[in-house]
Image: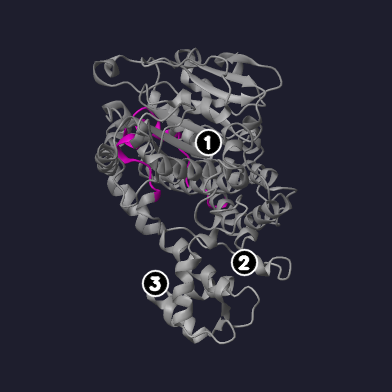
Amino acid sequence: MFRKNLKKDPELFQNVAEGLRRLYRTKLFPLEDTYRFHDFHSPALEDADFDNKPMVLLVGQYSTGKTTFIRHLMEQDFPGMRIGPEPTTDCFISVMHGEQEGVIPGNALVVDPKKPFRKLNAFGNAFLNRFMCAQLPNPVLESISIIDTPGILSGEKQRISRGYDFAAVLEWFAERVDRIILLFDAHKLDISDEFSEVIRALKNHEDKMRVVLNKADQISTQQLMRVYGALMWSLGKIINTPEVVRVYIGSFWAQPLLVPDNRKLFEAEEMDLFLDIQSLPRNASLRKLNDLIKRARLAKVQAYIISSLKKEMPSVFGKDSKKKELIANLGEIYVKIEKEHQISPGDFPNLAKMQELLNGQDFTKFAVLKPKLLEAVEDMLANDIARLMAMVRQEEASVPNQSVKGGAFEGTMSGPFGHGYGEGASEGIDELDWVVGRDKPTYDEIFYTLSPINGKVSGAAAKKEMLKSKLPNTVLGKIWKLADVDKDGLLDDEEFALANHLIKVKLEGHELPPSLPEHLVPPSKRGTVQPE
């Protein structure tokens, strides 16, 4: 048990992880323990929960490409990996970094204090026999860990019991991971009853959720649009929130595209997903802080519910009948607590689930409301968390380049196959001739209609021509700044051609560069004027 040590003085922390650990032990855990939070919601947090690397949880029906996705990210096989069209992965596999390649079985994993899995012991042998850790030296795993899950079943297969509460296990992982990736197969889009149940179980973690529509290269553009629309409609019905979950479309494996029509879309989507995953180490402390705040809010509500039930219980006779009555009227108790303590309805636990769990509890052993415990948590939320938030920003600033490296992440960084290479403002980057020169004769015809004086046109004359593009003034102003290389407030024929080239770049849907790249500097200005 943790020491119940409630301090009034401000706490001093060496780092965010240590601060979170101490706040949890001294202020939040006593409240959780007193009001049986761990019996109703989530096991107590361990030291490893505050120190572990960011984790990515992959969830999807069988044959949606979960294991292949991990293989694609790491560019390496991992122990215990099986890939096939049938339900191959029948285990939860935690893929983590280790100096030696090997497998740790579930029963050994849950007694290792350095791993954040000790509380999974509660799910019993049926689950532990289906849980293992694959360790291997891989640069991607130096920054993140990845959880591969059994393929979610569909049709008749989903009626076969797994022997453990699959949705509850996923919910346990969802509370502790940094990113949840739901994979769907564009070629055979289907959301089974079990998958719907799983998505609903993850409902409180929408902020961590991303959706991947995989194998999108197997269908045509027209079919892809229909599949994407059907997926969004189905998810909207299940998640039942006005916010739209981010969906990444692509083919996440290292094989040739079957239908290459959407190659540029797939490349852009993969780049966005990779950037999202790469940001996880940088945002890990903030995620843990956010999760602790969510946990503290739920623990406060739990304290009010349990103490309200205790208060209503008779001291001698009619305990059983009163217990049944209180469980049946739990919704009214929720409303009463909501009004009395100004708590948002969204902070309350699921009513039906709470009623089910209360059936097996002895109400007479519940604790009465202890204001000091609640004050400690209020103080933590009001003061300590604010100071930790400032420390998060300091830690981020001191280690600016925290991101996932290695594997597939290296292939998109630089060189001719980097995203956007040779496109937009980067067109002509590795050519000897000035790329603007290709269309300069056309631009020169326009230039000489503007009556240049001493080989240059004024800003007013250039503006009239540039406005024909219908681009906003803010964009045209930036183009002018980039094109007026010698900063004399006038444009010569090369600078005018450059301005028109940048207008074309913007009209084709590309972004303007923050400063003029060397390959776009007009030949006559090279060596005399340094680009900004």
Tell me which corner region of the image, top left, top right, bottom left or bottom right, holds residue 326.
top left
User: What type is the residue that disc 3 sits on?
Assistant: Ser
Mark 3 or mark 1, which is nearer the start of the sequence? 1
404 in relation to 339, above or below: above
271 in relation to 451, above or below: above
Q: Nearer the viewer, residue 531 or 23?
A: 531
| Mark identifier at residue 213 | none
Q: Residue tagged by mark 3?
A: 469
Q: Could you tell me if residue 208 is visible in this image? A: no
Of discs 2 and 1, which sits in the foreground? 2
- Residue 93 forms part of the magenta stretch: no
Dot 2 falls on a residue whose secondary structure is loop
Q: Residue tagged by mark 2?
A: 522
User: What type is the residue that disc 2 sits on?
Assistant: Pro
Q: Residue tagged by mark 1?
A: 176
Residue 434, x across and y down, in percent:
59, 59
